[in-house]
Amino acid sequence: MQVTCPSGLIFEGRPWNRGDQRKLLQESQENESLLLPKRMVEMATVSVIDPGPYSFNAGGLVAWDEVTSVDIVRANVAIRIETDPIYLFQRNCQRCGALTDPPLEVDLREFEMRPASDEGKGLIQSRETKSVKLASTEGEVVVHLKPMRSREMVLLGKVQSQDVSALIDGDILMGIDRVTLPGGKEIQGVERINRFLDKQGWGFVPKLEAEVDQLWGWMDTEISWRCKEFSCRCEQKSALPLDLGFYGVAPPTKSGPPANPPSDSASAETTTPEPSSLPPLDSQTPPI
Ligand SMILES: [Zn+2]
């Protein structure tokens, strides 16, 4: 199968198999900060067809460390579509806390992708940042944007495991290299940039988001759903979780409902993923 990513990277991939799942389970037990989406796409990569803006060569392997997070997400969704396009997962309602039962069901083929702009592709290649002037509480600032790559995805996971609220705008946070204040002073580092963003009005981050989506490309992975609890019915949105459940593997250490749904039907399609006891948003879930 041929996979095209938002940056223009095209690679030859294959669906995941049982051996990949076994490897993933073993590695995730041994290494807590394992970046699942990167590791899984590595396993399913056969060779580069067109490197797009990256420095690796056609015919060789994809150096996934260099690749942008939106490309990694796209690659995961494309491989999962080839493996099994229907994905079942569970979430707790944001209002009443009830777990979705039956699980939410999404058809991954419906998720859209938008390519990176030519300017964005050029910046991925040159590793330069894009300067965006914006009005802020400190006056006009310059925000220097860079594409989030896998090492920033790992860093974001660490930040999120300490502070769940950092999930909000996490992709933007990791996509800011630095901010230049009106006097020329620069703000750098995740925590300082996060504090700066906290002081801004509601329109600040959406402007950056629009810029980021255009530059590096975009993958729609938002799922809208409604709580089924009779007294709640809350409408909400969740990001597609790229966690162990996405790879058809239930977390080994958590208790919960059995990994296999009770079924007396031997004719059940073997390709249907198990509504496994899915982990909550954890440190390995990238923001999408
Ligand atoms: Zn609810």
Image: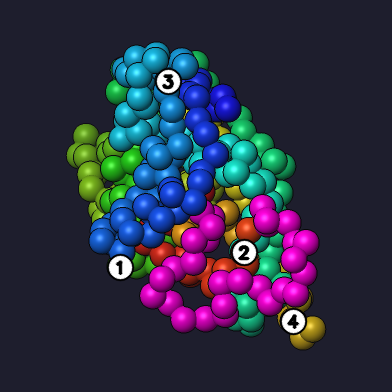
Amino acid type at circle 3 is: Val
Q: How much space separates mark 3 and mark 1, taking CA atoms?
A: 36 Å
Q: Of the residues under marks 3 and 2, which one precedes in the sequence?
A: 3
Q: Mark 2 sits on what residue? A: 274
Q: Check mark 4 vs ligand 1: CB closer than 8 Å? yes or no.
A: yes
Q: Of the residues under marks 1 and 4, which one precedes in the sequence?
A: 1
Amino acid type at circle 1 is: Gln
Residue at image coords 62%, 77%: 99
The reply to whether dot 1 and dot 2 touch (C-beta < 8 Å) is no
Q: Position of residue 200 (x, y in %)?
A: 42, 53
Q: How much space separates mark 3 and mark 2, taking CA atoms?
A: 32 Å
Q: How much space separates mark 1 and mark 2, taking CA atoms?
A: 30 Å
Q: SS for tag 3?
A: strand
Q: Position of residue 68 (x, y in %)?
A: 40, 34
Please state which of the two labelled residues, at mark 1 or mark 2, is closer to the viewer.
2
Q: Of the residues under marks 3 and 4, which one precedes in the sequence?
A: 3
Please state which of the two labelled residues, at mark 3 or mark 2, is closer to the viewer.
2
Amino acid type at circle 4 is: Glu
Q: Mark 1 sits on what residue? A: 162
Q: Mark 4 sits on what residue? A: 229
